[in-house]
Amino acid sequence: TVDGVATYDTVMLDGLNFEIYFSGITLSADGTHYVIESVIIDAHYSYSDNRLYDAVIIYIPSKYDGLPVYAIGSIDYRFPVPDSCLKDGATVKLIIGDGIKQIGETEYAGVDFMCGGINELYIPASVEVVGEKALYKRCQLTKVYCEATQQPEGFAPDWIADDVTVEWGAR
């Protein structure tokens, strides 16, 4: 842990390096799970690589320090993959780890996802609650794949912008 931010994982992909940090880590009172204030994703890339990608997949893990992550307040995708590293029509997909139950509906509610450059999102069936406008602002999302067959009751009516396609029952 450095200055209250724990480096969780580093993912390397030929010329691209993603560092995933958990910030504002709170252990539940009963010690069974964590609530994460913010997931921070830093993407670093090599200009000398000259490689173009069809797809980039970023995975938010559902465990921290051996215990499940119950909720995520926000996701901050700080340094998106530049268009110069992507082929035309490339997909940058964010996958929420199976087991996470809440997104944007914690004591940190109102903090929007800052996910510029991410155009697809996968939400597992374990997610029962998505906060109001959690995926509304500052996003370039065009498609959300939800494993649930229909919108769970815990999803706020305006959890996502109207211009984003949502596919229910996705695997």
Image (tube, rainbow, N blue to C red):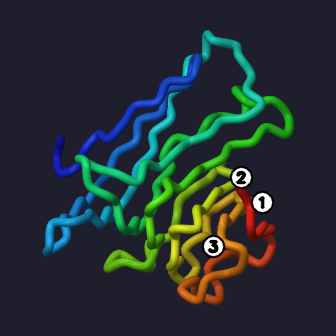
Q: Please report the residue visible at 81 percent of the width from the left and 29 percent of the height from the top.
A: 87
Q: Which picture quadrant has residue 152?
A: bottom right
Number of other residues with Cα within 10 Å of mark 1, as a class: few under 14, some 14 to 19, many 20 or more: some
Question: Which element carries disc 3, helix, strand or loop?
Answer: loop
Where is residue 22 shown, x and y percent of the image? 32, 51
Which amino acid does the dot numbered 2 rest on? Asn
Instruction: Give the camera-side residue of 27 and 169.
Output: 169
Say above or below: 88 vs 149: above
The x, y position of residue 142, in whole percent, is: 77, 60
Residue that mark 2 sits on: 119
Q: CA distance from mark 2 to mark 3?
A: 13 Å
Query: Disc 1 marks which amino acid?
Result: Thr
Q: In the orientation shown, which residue stands out farthest toward the right?
A: 88
Report which quarter residue 170 is drawn in. bottom right
Q: Are marks 2 and 1 in contact (CB under 8 Å)?
A: yes
**Image quadrant where one finds the N terminus:** top left
- Please tell me which residue is depicted at 56% across the width and 18% down the height of the picture: 46
| Real-space CA distance between mark 2 and mark 1, rounded to the nearest whole angstrom | 5 Å
Instruction: Quickly name the residue at label 3.
Output: 136
Mark found first going from the N terminus, 2 or 3 = 2
Q: Is residue 162 above or below residue 11?
A: below
The residue identified by callout 1 is 142
Q: Residue at x 71, y 16 (%)?
A: 51
The three-letter amino acid code for the residue at tag 3 is Tyr
How dense is the environment of label 2, judged by Cα within 10 Å: few (below 14), some, or many (20 and up)? some
| Depicted 25 relative to depicted 71: above or below | above
